[in-house]
Amino acid sequence: MTEDWPTVRLDLDSRPETLTLVRGALGGVADQLALDPELLDDLKTAVSEACNNVVMHAYDDEPGPLDVLLYARQDAIEVVIRDEGSGIDAIPAADDRLQGVGLPVIRALTQHSEFNSLPAGGTEVRMVFAGEREGKRLFRKPARATPEEQWADQLAGDAVVSLSPVSFVGGVLGRLARALAAKARFSLDRFSDVYLVTDAIAAHAARAARGERIAFSMSTEVRRLELTIGPFRDGTGSWLSENESSQDVGGALSMLSDEVEVRPVQDGEMLHVVMVDHRPVGRSLSG
């Protein structure tokens, strides 16, 4: 069923905390699609189960790639999950990836599901969720997703995300940034700044994105969050200096970020932002 380009693509590592990022991204998608609450519950449960199977079974000692692609179609939502691990054929028949809780839950919550071994190694899970129930539409269809660009392959970090249309960036970016800020042990005060900065970036994307697809990457260290996002139209980076002292969201970005840099890319520019928590170590989001 998969065709064209995904509405949302997540490139992640198969770590336990990755499930928080996946569920956060689904929540952001749900807001933009006005997703039915029951459908959202089914989507989060089935996708979390499939991703957890990758975390638990696909790799040995070290985490490996975990890709999640979501397609919002006219009458259904399709989610594809891929890994590059041992492959479904190498898993014992008694494993719950095949017989236990995981597969029955996914089958019960989806209209259609498939588990396939990939030719180059790894497993692909395809899940289709019905977009109607008793004649009622369960989500609002977005605009057609536009193609991904090759430069986005150069992005790297704890999370690499591609979105189309650009309107999805606000909900998805904010949720993922807050989850990663908690992982980075940001203090409660600095954590609140993440809300304002991601709001500012989403507002900039809405007015300055070069097209109808945008990509971003986020990386963390202890008390540090780094974000690269774009592409934006050439020259729109001047918006940063023009709003540096203002009180709007643009001013918030300049005042609350430790580094803000505009980087040229082919036919556009990227925005690079770093936030560091300089406050004395005390209570943080992670305890």
Image (cartoon, rainbow, N blue to C red):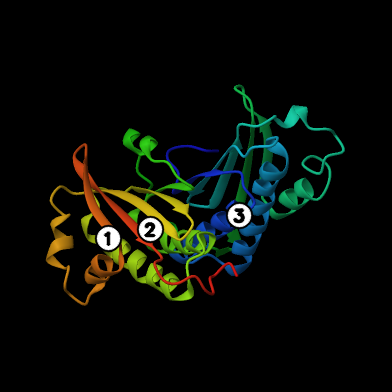
Taking depth in this image into account, of 269 and 149 the one nearest to the observer is 269
Q: Residue at x 60, y 54 (%)?
A: 17
Q: Give amino acid for label 3.
A: Glu
Task: Say if 137 sits above or below 270 in the image.
Answer: below
| Element carrying mark 1 | helix
Residue carrying label 3 = 17
Q: Position of residue 76 (x, y in %)?
A: 55, 51
Residue carrying label 1 = 206
Q: Residue at x 17, y 74 (%)?
A: 246
Taking depth in this image into account, of 226 and 249 the one nearest to the observer is 226
| Element carrying mark 2 | helix
Disc sitting over residue 169 in the figure: 2
Q: Residue at x 75, y 52 (%)?
A: 105
Sooner in the amino-acid sequence: mark 1 or mark 2:
2
User: Are dots 1 and 2 in contact, CB under 8 Å?
Assistant: yes
Q: Give amino acid for label 2.
A: Val
